[in-house]
Amino acid sequence: TNRTFTMIKPDAVENGHIGGILSMITEAGFRIVSLKLTQLTLADAQAFYAVHKERPFFGELVEFMTRGPIVAAILEKDNAVEDFRALIGATNPADAAEGTIRKKYATSVGENAVHGSDSDENAAIESNFHFAGREQF
Ligand code: GTP
Ligand code: MG
């Protein structure tokens, strides 16, 4: 599809980067389909990141993602999933290319400022996890 799902993670919200990150997203040609400030519960974060539940950093990841508010958004653009992964950059900001969101705003491999869906299927699942149909414009 032409849609993807993103979260501005608690580190970037705490550090005052909501506006800067949304600007980079819209300047890259994405249309905002849905947008809200919200906070994940423990159960939400465990479900959202269930694919990582056997990884050694799972506890740390869930603790981080629940410690404060996040911005959840659905974005639209041709080739949205792949183009958005390119815009955010590598998981570890030390490996992220110049001009990417993580290069500019991430502080570590764990606290890396933004999430981007990794497939069309997951984009739809994650979007519907956060937004009702009437909130998807
Ligand atoms: P997302 O867009 O958030 O899914 O990131 P990603 O697809 O680039 O990475 P991945 O799905 O492999 O990992 C999900 C998230 O787990 C990462 O974005 C990090 O927040 C966290 N994470 C990944 N590796 C590590 C690690 O080695 N240590 C810690 N503390 N967190 C990690
Ligand atoms: Mg991922």
Image (spheres, rainbow, N blue to C red):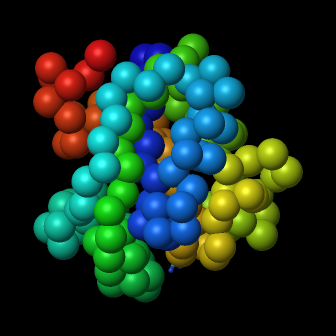
Q: Is residue 93 visible?
A: yes
> Could you tell me which quadrant the N terminus lies in?
top left
**Taking 56 as reference, is 89 above or below it?**
above
Q: Report the residue at 57% width, 14% height from top.
A: 78
Q: Report the residue at 29% width, 35% height from top.
A: 127
Residue 25 picture location, percent across and down = 60, 34
Asked if residue 69 lies left or right of residue 29, the reply is left
Q: Report the residue at 25% width, 61% height from top.
A: 39
Q: Report the residue at 32% width, 62% height from top.
A: 69
Q: How many marks?
A: 0
Residue 97 picture location, percent across and down = 82, 52
Asked if residue 76 lies left or right of residue 53, the reply is right
Residue 87 picture location, percent across and down = 68, 40
Q: Is residue 50 visible?
A: no
Point out the residue furthest to the right here.
98
Q: Quadrant of residue 104?
A: bottom right
> Could you tell me which quadrant the C terminus lies in?
top left
Residue 49 picture location, percent across and down = 32, 62
